[in-house]
């Protein structure tokens, strides 16, 4: 099957951008007309008078400012960097040697920062996984071997929406909760799926998944995947947001822990949302159904 | 035993008022993991009582109704899937 995800998302982004322009034109027509004239004027001026070096440097400054905006989400900081950069570009008399020097230093800085960042993330992951291995305290193998096993589990997740350090933190939580190492791959897989769909903080989801794994009794022919699949379908069909669902779970998880009736428990949570009762009645409601004398 | 006879027994044992067809549709609709968990719940309750038939019958009927109600199904459907489960597991 042909993978069209990138062209599709590009197409969607362009559509979204055009719709944004339309909306802006509808709400502020005069400002949009002035803005468009300004861009056309600058583009003509830049293309007729400036050298190729200035154009390349302007592009570098714009890309750097966009990176700053993406990272900090602060328009003021990004526009300050852009203004300072453009001011420098347009005031300096650029010669080929100056231009090469600027570009070399810029690339050197970017590559160094990239490496420092990679090393920092790698050492963070190393430290988290070592913590995890120590807390698991597996007597049959050394902590180093356990750490390697955890690394393999972390790398086994396909199409991960979680970053490597986030996956390591999730595995550490599983180790703290004493989840069986054989079940961690499935647990991580489901945190990844739930995170991709719900966008709930991944540590909350990790806690949710670990509680379900710990409190579910598996029988012949039933896998933990079947259980998570059942929970996901229920969560999707209830008239509540995933965040509300997890909040209600946090309030009533002790009932699941004491009864281990996983399916009945989640079915009851779904019924509770459908019944439209007050949130403060949830504990009473779930207890009256899930606890069987 | 024909499915209609099985449905008749399920109705008699639980006091259900569903038709044969409704019971069979109900049985088909039950999810495998729901089936596994509720059958174990019924089994646990029945074993807890552990009484001779004439004394245990009414309690068993009550147990089927109690579990069926919690899992949102009819008691006759519960009885049917429990009998199936018993055949596979014991």
Image (cartoon, coloured by chain):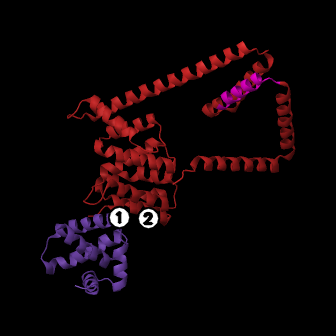
Chain colours: A red, B purple
Residue at the farthest top position: A97
Could you say which is closer to the camera, residue A47 or residue A36?
A47
Q: Is residue A180 visible?
A: no
- Residue A189 % position (x, y): 40, 47
Q: Is residue A110 left or right of residue B42?
A: right
Question: What range is drawn magenta here?
Answer: A50-66
Could you say which is closer to the camera, residue A37 or residue A3?
A3
Instruction: Answer whether residue A51 is magenta in the image.
Output: yes
Select label 1 or label 2 by which is in front: 2
Total numbered circles: 2
Disc 2 on helix, strand or loop? helix
Q: Is residue A21 above or below residue B31?
A: above
Q: Is residue B64 left or right of residue A226?
A: left
Q: Which residue is mark 1?
A: A289
Q: Is residue A237 visible?
A: yes
Point 69% across, 32% down: residue: A75
- Badge 2: chain ID: A
CB under 8 Å between discs 1 and 2 = yes
Where is residue A148, by image quadrant?
top left
Same-chain check, marks 1 and 2? yes
Instruction: Answer whether residue A5 is magenta in the image.
Output: no
- Residue A291 % position (x, y): 31, 61
Earlier in the chain: of badge 1 and badge 2, it is 2
Q: Is residue A263 above or below residue A66?
A: below
Q: Which mark is residue A6?
A: none
- Badge 1: chain ID: A
Q: Which residue is mark 2?
A: A271
Q: Main secondary structure of the magenta part?
A: helix
Point 44% across, 35% down: residue: A164
- Residue B82 % position (x, y): 25, 72
């Amino acid at each position: 099957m042909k993978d069209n995800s990138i062209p599709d998302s590009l197409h969607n982004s362009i559509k979204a951008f055009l719709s944004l322009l339309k909306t802006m034109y509808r709400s502020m027509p005069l400002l949009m007309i002035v803005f468009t004239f300004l861009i056309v004027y600058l583009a003509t001026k830049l293309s007729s008078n400036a050298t190729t070096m200035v154009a390349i440097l302007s592009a570098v400054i714009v890309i750097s400012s966009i990176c700053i905006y993406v990272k900090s989400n602060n328009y003021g900081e990004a526009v300050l960097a852009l203004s300072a950069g453009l001011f420098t570009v347009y005031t300096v008399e650029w010669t080929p040697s100056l231009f090469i020097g600027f570009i070399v230093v810029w690339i050197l800085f970017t590559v160094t920062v990239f490496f420092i960042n990679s090393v920092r993330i790698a050492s963070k992951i190393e430290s988290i996984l070592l913590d995890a291995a120590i807390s698991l305290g597996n007597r049959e193998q050394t902590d180093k071997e356990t750490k390697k096993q955890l690394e393999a589990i972390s790398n086994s997740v396909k199409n991960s929406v979680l970053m490597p350090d986030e996956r390591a933190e999730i595995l550490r939580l599983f180790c703290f909760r004493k989840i069986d190492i054989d079940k961690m791959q499935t647990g991580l897989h489901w945190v990844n799926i739930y995170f991709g769909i719900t966008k709930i903080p991944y540590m909350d989801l990790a806690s949710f998944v670990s509680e379900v794994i710990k409190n579910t009794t598996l029988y012949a022919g039933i896998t933990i995947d079947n259980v998570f699949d059942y929970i996901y379908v229920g969560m999707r069909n209830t008239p509540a947001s995933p965040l509300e669902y997890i909040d209600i779970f946090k309030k009533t998880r002790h009932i699941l822990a004491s009864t281990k009736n996983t399916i009945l428990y989640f079915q009851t949570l779904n019924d509770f949302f459908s019944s439209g009762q007050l949130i403060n009645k949830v504990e009473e409601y779930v207890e009256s159904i899930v606890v069987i004398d | 035993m024909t499915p209609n006879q099985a449905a008749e027994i399920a109705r008699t044992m639980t006091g259900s008022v569903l038709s044969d067809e409704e019971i069979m549709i109900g049985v088909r609709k039950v999810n495998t993991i729901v089936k596994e968990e509720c059958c174990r719940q019924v089994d646990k309750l029945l074993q807890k009582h552990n009484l001779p038939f004439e004394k245990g019958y009414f309690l068993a009927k009550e147990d089927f109704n109690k579990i069926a109600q919690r899992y949102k199904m009819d008691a006759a459907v519960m009885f049917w899937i429990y009998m199936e489960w018993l055949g596979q597991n014991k």
